[in-house]
Every structure is written in structure tokens, then in C-alpha cells.
Amino acid sequence: MSRFVDIEASDEITLANGDKVTVRQRLTAPEDAELVRRLMRMRIDAKTGAVQAEEGDWHLQRVHICEAYLLGWDFRDDEGKVMGFERALIRQLDQDTVVEIATAIDALQAARREAAEKKG
């Protein structure tokens, strides 16, 4: 695997109802750091002043994962009109859709890491 991220490399994921989403294969170092920052919540201990990282809200984490990885979709509205992909529309998706997409992205990334580890 190259040390450099091909920012145009993508995968297509088919969701349970047959809709398809296009997702990035990898994030760059700054993108990954930003995602981690958004997934964690920092808390300062009042007694010691120490900064502690805690996991943030699970549902909001799913939104952040979608925002980081999603490149496109073939979703349609209630009248059957194709809804062009816009990053801002991610926050208008229903919770079940966000969870399904984020779970699929997590599984894809886990499989990619496992394959890379097997290669050595």
C-alpha cells in the first residue's frame, strides 16, 4: 500500500434496499486526525486540570463518519427524483440510513485493514 492516499480512489457499497453509496477508500492524515477529533469529546478534570478524551455521542459519530467518507449516492426522493449528492444533505438523512452507511463504512475499513495486515 502506498504511503500516499489516492484521494480519488473509491468503493461502491450497496445498501439493504439496493441503493448505492460511493465512499473514499482512505483518508489523508489530516482528514483522519479531524475525524478522530470529531469522534472524541475532550473533558478537563476540575481537580487535576488533566485533559481526558471520551467517546462522543454515538449517533453524531455516525454522521461524522459519513461526512468524512461519503462521495456520492443514487438516492431518490419520495417522487422518484434523483437526489444529487451534496455534503450538506448528509445531515438531512434519517438516523437509520446514517447508521447503515456508517456501519458499512466501518466494515469496509476493517476488511481493508485486515487484508493489509495479512499482506504484511
Image (spheres, rainbow, N blue to C red):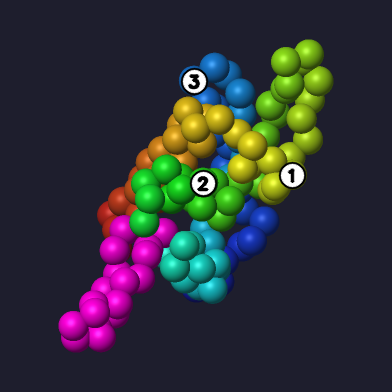
Q: Tag 1's secondary structure?
A: loop
Image quarter in which the C terminus is found: bottom left
Q: CA distance from mark 2 to mark 1?
A: 14 Å
Q: Relative to the observer, which residue lies in front, 26 or 102?
A: 102
Residue nearest the viewer, comparing 16 with 11: 16
Residue 5 sits above or below residue 81 on the image: below
Image mark count: 3
Residue 107 at x, y = what percent? 38, 41
Which label lies toward us, 3 or 1? 1
Kindly identify the residue that appears in the image at 26 percent across and 74 percent down. Answer: 52
Residue 17 visible in this rendered orientation of the protein: yes
User: Is 30 covered by the magenta stretch?
Assistant: no
Q: Which residues are magenta?
A: 39-55
Relative image position of residue 112 (x, y in whole percent): 40, 50
Tag 1: amino acid: Glu
Question: Residue 18's spot in the image, x, y percent?
Answer: 57, 19
Q: Which residue is mark 1?
A: 86
| Element type where label 3 sits in the image | loop
- Under mark 2, the amino acid is Val
Residue that badge 3 annotates = 16
Q: Secondary structure at mark 2?
A: helix
Earlier residue among tags 3 and 1: 3
Residue position for label 2: 63
2 and 1 marks in contact (CB < 8 Å):
no
Q: Residues within 10 Å of mark 3 (few under 14, many from 20)?
A: few
Tell me the crowding category of disc 2: few under 14, some 14 to 19, or many 20 or more residues within 10 angstroms, Cα based: many
Residue in view at x 70 percent, y 47 percent: 88
